[in-house]
Image: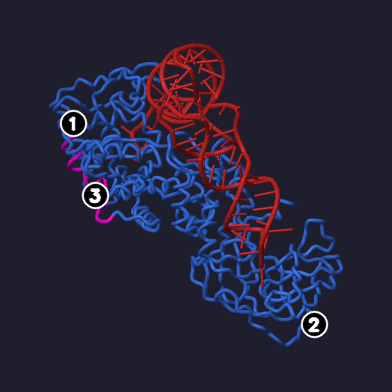
Chain colours: A blue, B red
RNA sequence: UGGGGAGUCGCCAAGCGGUAAGGCAGCGGCCUUUGGAGCCGCCAUUCGGAGGUUCGAAUCCUCCCUCCCCAGCCA
């Protein structure tokens, strides 16, 4: 019997989890994915989702979905629903473990009073400006607020009146009493609660004070018995505060926070603020515009959950800043669709070809793949599959040359018809009846195989061709990212010619249009007007030699 | 100039003192009724730099350099 070494953990997070499990520090791993419902999920969130749900799944644990809804002025129910849909679509399930930070508002409030009683929190009545000034700078310590030494009773009274709605927004805040001289600015008496007279999407008008992320998050984790609270690098500085709260509040468990690098993708933006601007200022058609890096956008573009999951796995989890090439995302979707998408033929930029020796009134139906494709005297081929005076490495159609029409016949171009301006408007050709199906009995092998569609049987479809939304790799980098928008990011082909088998295809169905790429049916489609989105092109060796 | 992180192939990323995994991209070749796919091969004498410890260093020590994050009553 051979003993194989146990597979090593794929990343440092799983390494930590395995150690904790092995050492008995926890019997079961519980993670959580904590979105704020103030925007749609994007591919960066997908990385976090795959990590949190992935780790929980692999080690027999559980991953909670918890909405971090502590700021009623920015959050909306519409986002909640979209987020749940996106996570489920990606293939992950939170089961019964759907929670909200707002579920814990009562408990959080009780604990805040306890902090006050323990003289570990106080009500500050300084203005935001005053607080900023007193906080000090990166190199200078802060100074203590004049309200810092209010009595417990006075703090309790004020805090209760804040809760009762007696004060206007901004009049007071509750602060932790830690250390105004800490080199870590997050420890300089951070704000725990602020007054917000706003209607919360779940708690309505029950509250006029709301906890801050730094207060709500660790305590919510503890309430849910989260063992590993995974977040991104910018929270590293907050960990001492996270731990301070866990230690100074009588919480029921001892969660630990670990930080990993967020995903960055080139040629796009990932911040919710910027994505929101693209939507609000109509630079894109919506959160689900196929050019958006949102889950909804990728879905509409034709990406599959498996492709996104595989992408996230390839990207890995580590602590160094990264900028992933979109090429890797494209590889992931090609890889998936290559094995699953039915092949079909469609011509984006049609050039008419008349096969002179083919009977005018005949239509043959070639059975290929799972469908039948009609062939007739007049067909369309792709305009750039013909060059009148071809360069050396070009082996598609040109005068006198024979090529194969995929699954049909060999044809030889006999003449070129031009308009007065010299534009090619039509080609004439002859076919070899002996090559029916695409093989020659004499073993002739054309150097090229072209896709085509019979003119009289073609269905006109709108095809939307997408390119990267931004011109430069890092649009965030210089000045206004909107100046970097790629004006060519969407090109519409109003009347592409598609083979008739695609009639009736349901939205989100993916096909490979042979030699062109993967395309999927857009939900804008109607029964008699199908719209396709190009998900991704095929790799194009000819483009390289060109 | 304070604090917290990070530097291994063009882009990711393993490596945890025993002589640089893997993926993407790229480059050759084979094969092919998609210039696709598939298959085969190539692709870091060197790990931000300089010293040091050691029989042996990407891994340990020292100094230096570069990049990222933090001064919301956002998350």
Which label belongs to residue A357?
2
Q: Is residue A101 magenta?
A: yes
Mark positioned earlier in the residue sequence (2 or 1):
1
Residue A247 rendering spot, x and y as whole percentages: 21, 29
Q: How crowded is mark 1: few (under 14 residues within 10 Å), some or many (20 or more)?
A: many
* Res B15 → quadrant: top left
Mark 1, residue position: A158
Most extreme residue toward the bottom, as rendered? A361
Tell me where the magenta segment starts and ends, as one range: A95-112
Q: Which SS class for mark 3?
A: loop
Tell me which residue sits at (20%, 42%) in the image: A223
| Magenta stretch encompasses residue A226 | no
User: Which residue has dot 3 on it?
Assistant: A203
| Callouts 2 and 3 close, C-beta under 8 Å | no
Residue A173 lies in what quarter of the image? top left
| Residue nearest the observer in this picture, A191 or A330 | A330
């Amino acid at each position: 019997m051979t003993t194989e070494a146990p597979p090593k953990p794929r990343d440092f997070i799983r390494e930590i989890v395995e150690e904790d499990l092995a050492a008995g520090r926890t019997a079961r791993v519980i993670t959580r994915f904590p979105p704020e419902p103030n925007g749609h999920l994007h591919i960066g969130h997908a990385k976090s989702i795959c990590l949190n749900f992935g780790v929980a799944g692999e080690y027999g644990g559980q991953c909670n979905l918890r909405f971090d809804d502590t700021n009623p002025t920015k959050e909306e129910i519409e986002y909640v629903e979209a987020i749940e849909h996106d996570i489920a679509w990606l293939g992950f399930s939170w089961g019964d473990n759907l929670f909200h930070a707002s579920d814990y508002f009562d408990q959080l409030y009780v604990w805040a009073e306890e902090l006050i009683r323990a003289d570990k929190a106080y009500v500050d009545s300084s203005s935001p400006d005053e607080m900023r000034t007193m906080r000090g700078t990166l190199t200078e310590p802060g100074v203590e607020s004049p309200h810092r030494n209010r009595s417990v009773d006075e703090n309790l009274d004020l805090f209760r009146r804040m809760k009762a709605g007696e004060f206007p927004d901004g009049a007071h805040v509750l602060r932790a009493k830690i250390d105004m001289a800490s080199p870590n600015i997050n420890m300089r008496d951070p704000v725990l609660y602020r007054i917000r007279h706003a209607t919360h999407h779940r708690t309505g008008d029950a509250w006029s004070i709301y906890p801050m992320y730094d207060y709500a998050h660790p305590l919510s984790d503890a309430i849910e018995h989260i063992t590993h609270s995974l977040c991104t690098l910018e929270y590293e500085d907050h960990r001492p505060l996270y731990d301070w709260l866990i230690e100074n509040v009588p919480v029921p468990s001892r969660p630990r926070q670990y930080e990993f690098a967020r995903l960055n993708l080139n040629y796009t933006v990932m911040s919710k603020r910027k994505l929101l601007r693209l939507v609000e200022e109509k630079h894109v058609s919506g959160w689900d515009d196929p050019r958006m890096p949102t889950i909804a956008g990728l879905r509409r573009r034709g990406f599959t959950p498996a492709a996104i999951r595989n992408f996230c796995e390839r990207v890995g989890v580590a602590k160094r800043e990264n900028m992933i090439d979109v090429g890797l995302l494209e590889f992931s979707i090609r890889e998936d669709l290559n094995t699953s998408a039915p092949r079909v033929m469609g011509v984006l930029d049609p050039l008419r070809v008349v096969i002179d020796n083919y009977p005018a009134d005949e239509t043959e139906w070639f059975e290929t793949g799972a469908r039948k494709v009609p062939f007739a005297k007049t067909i369309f081929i792709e305009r750039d599959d013909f060059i009148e005076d071809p360069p050396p490495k070009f082996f598609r159609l040109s005068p006198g040359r024979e090529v194969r029409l995929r699954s049909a016949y060999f044809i030889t171009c006999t003449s070129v018809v031009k308009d007065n301006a010299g534009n090619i408007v039509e080609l004439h050709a002859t076919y070899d009846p002996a090559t029916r199906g695409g093989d020659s009995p004499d073993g002739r092998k054309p150097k090229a195989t072209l896709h085509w569609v019979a003119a009289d049987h073609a269905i006109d479809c709108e095809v939307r061709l997408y390119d990267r939304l931004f011109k430069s790799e890092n649009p965030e980098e210089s000045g206004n990212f909107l100046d970097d928008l790629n004006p060519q990011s969407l090109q519409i082909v109003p009347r592409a010619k598609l083979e008739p088998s695609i009639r009736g295809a349901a939205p989100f169905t993916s096909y490979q249009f042979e030699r062109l790429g993967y395309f999927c049916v857009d939900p804008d489609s109607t029964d008699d007007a199908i719209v396709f989105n190009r998900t991704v092109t095929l790799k194009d060796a000819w483009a390289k030699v060109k």
